[in-house]
Image (cartoon, rainbow, N blue to C red):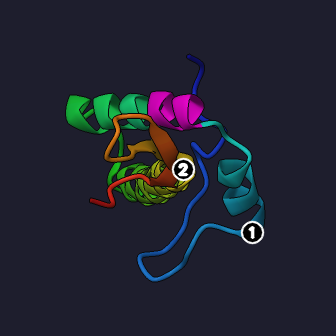
Protein backbone atom coordinates (compact mmCIF):
# COMPACT_ATOMS: atom_id res chain seq x y z
CA UNK A 1 0.00 0.00 0.00
CA UNK A 2 1.34 3.44 -0.83
CA UNK A 3 1.60 6.33 1.57
CA UNK A 4 -1.77 7.62 2.60
CA UNK A 5 -2.97 10.78 0.84
CA UNK A 6 -3.34 12.58 4.15
CA UNK A 7 0.35 12.35 5.02
CA UNK A 8 1.73 15.83 5.32
CA UNK A 9 -1.60 17.46 6.18
CA UNK A 10 -1.42 19.29 9.44
CA UNK A 11 -4.52 19.42 11.58
CA UNK A 12 -4.40 20.98 14.99
CA UNK A 13 -5.47 19.08 18.10
CA UNK A 14 -8.93 20.66 18.02
CA UNK A 15 -9.36 20.70 14.23
CA UNK A 16 -11.22 17.98 12.41
CA UNK A 17 -10.39 16.55 9.00
CA UNK A 18 -11.91 18.60 6.21
CA UNK A 19 -15.06 17.62 4.38
CA UNK A 20 -13.09 16.12 1.49
CA UNK A 21 -11.31 13.72 3.85
CA UNK A 22 -14.62 12.71 5.44
CA UNK A 23 -16.12 12.12 1.98
CA UNK A 24 -13.04 10.10 1.05
CA UNK A 25 -13.58 7.83 4.05
CA UNK A 26 -17.32 7.54 3.41
CA UNK A 27 -16.58 6.23 -0.08
CA UNK A 28 -14.33 3.42 1.20
CA UNK A 29 -15.47 -0.16 1.49
CA UNK A 30 -15.19 -1.89 4.85
CA UNK A 31 -12.20 -3.90 3.60
CA UNK A 32 -10.38 -0.83 2.26
CA UNK A 33 -11.04 1.02 5.53
CA UNK A 34 -9.66 -1.85 7.59
CA UNK A 35 -6.60 -2.09 5.34
CA UNK A 36 -5.84 1.59 5.73
CA UNK A 37 -6.48 1.41 9.47
CA UNK A 38 -4.00 -1.48 9.77
CA UNK A 39 -1.41 0.55 7.85
CA UNK A 40 -1.95 3.51 10.19
CA UNK A 41 -1.51 1.30 13.26
CA UNK A 42 1.75 -0.12 11.86
CA UNK A 43 3.06 3.37 11.12
CA UNK A 44 2.16 4.65 14.58
CA UNK A 45 3.65 1.59 16.27
CA UNK A 46 6.88 1.96 14.29
CA UNK A 47 7.61 5.32 15.94
CA UNK A 48 9.03 6.62 12.64
CA UNK A 49 6.58 9.51 12.26
CA UNK A 50 6.71 12.99 13.72
CA UNK A 51 4.38 14.07 16.49
CA UNK A 52 2.37 16.21 14.08
CA UNK A 53 1.98 13.35 11.62
CA UNK A 54 1.15 10.97 14.47
CA UNK A 55 -1.74 13.21 15.49
CA UNK A 56 -2.99 13.39 11.88
CA UNK A 57 -2.69 9.61 11.55
CA UNK A 58 -4.53 9.08 14.83
CA UNK A 59 -7.36 11.38 13.73
CA UNK A 60 -7.64 9.60 10.37
CA UNK A 61 -7.56 6.24 12.16
CA UNK A 62 -10.30 7.36 14.54
CA UNK A 63 -12.50 8.37 11.59
CA UNK A 64 -11.76 5.06 9.82
CA UNK A 65 -12.68 3.09 12.96
CA UNK A 66 -15.98 4.94 13.23
CA UNK A 67 -16.65 4.26 9.55
CA UNK A 68 -15.93 0.54 10.01
CA UNK A 69 -18.24 0.36 13.03
CA UNK A 70 -21.01 2.08 11.06
CA UNK A 71 -20.57 -0.30 8.11
CA UNK A 72 -20.73 -3.30 10.44
CA UNK A 73 -23.85 -1.97 12.17
CA UNK A 74 -25.53 -1.40 8.80
CA UNK A 75 -24.65 -4.91 7.67
CA UNK A 76 -25.96 -6.40 10.90
CA UNK A 77 -29.23 -4.50 10.52
CA UNK A 78 -29.71 -6.02 7.06
CA UNK A 79 -29.20 -9.58 8.22
CA UNK A 80 -32.39 -11.44 8.99
CA UNK A 81 -32.87 -14.74 10.71
CA UNK A 82 -35.38 -17.23 9.46
CA UNK A 83 -37.85 -18.00 12.23
CA UNK A 84 -39.26 -21.50 12.56
CA UNK A 85 -42.82 -22.25 13.54
CA UNK A 86 -43.94 -24.90 16.06
CA UNK A 87 -43.98 -27.43 13.23
CA UNK A 88 -40.31 -26.75 12.42
CA UNK A 89 -41.12 -25.09 9.10
CA UNK A 90 -39.97 -21.60 8.15
CA UNK A 91 -42.44 -19.08 9.53
CA UNK A 92 -40.96 -15.78 8.37
CA UNK A 93 -37.98 -13.65 9.16
CA UNK A 94 -36.98 -11.40 12.02
CA UNK A 95 -34.11 -8.92 12.48
CA UNK A 96 -30.77 -10.33 13.52
CA UNK A 97 -30.31 -10.62 17.27
CA UNK A 98 -33.97 -10.81 18.25
CA UNK A 99 -34.90 -13.84 20.31
Q: Is residue 74 magenta?
A: no
Asked if labels 1 and 2 touch by Cβ distance under 8 angstroms, the answer is no
Q: From the viewer's side, name the closer residue of 82 and 55.
A: 82
Q: Describe residue 42's horizontal placement relative to residue 15 as left or right.
A: left
- Read off the residue under disc 1: 19
Residue 65 in the image: state x and y as whole percent.
41, 52
Q: From the viewer's side, name the closer residue of 2 and 35.
A: 35
Number of residues whose C-alpha sits closer than 10 Å to that of mark 1, classed few (under 14), some (14–19) or many (20 or more): few
The secondary element bearing badge 1 is classed as helix
- Read off the residue under disc 2: 71
Residue 69 in the image: state x and y as whole percent.
43, 54
Total residue callouts: 2
The residue at 56%/16% (across/down) is 1
Number of residues whose C-alpha sits closer than 10 Å to that of mark 2, classed few (under 14), some (14–19) or many (20 or more): some
Q: Describe residue 3's horizontal placement relative to residue 89 as left or right.
A: right
Residue 68 in the image: state x and y as whole percent.
47, 48
Label disc, if present, on residue 6 of the rendered structure: none
Residue 62 occupies quadrant: bottom left
Q: Is residue 32 magenta?
A: yes
The residue at 57%/42% (across/down) is 7
State whether residue 70 is above or below residue 14: above
Which of marks 1 and 2 precedes in the sequence?
1
State whether residue 6 is above or below residue 88: below
The magenta-colored residue range is 30-36
Residue 39 in the image: state x and y as whole percent.
41, 28
State whether residue 87 is above or below residue 21: above
Q: From the viewer's side, name the closer residue of 56 and 92.
A: 92
The residue at 48%/38% (across/down) is 90
The secondary element bearing badge 2 is classed as helix
Q: CA distance from mark 2 to mark 1?
A: 19 Å
Q: From the viewer's side, name the closer residue of 80 and 1.
A: 80
Amino acid sequence: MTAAPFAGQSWGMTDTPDTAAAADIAALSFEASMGELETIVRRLESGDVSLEESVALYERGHALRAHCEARLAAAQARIEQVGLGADGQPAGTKPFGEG
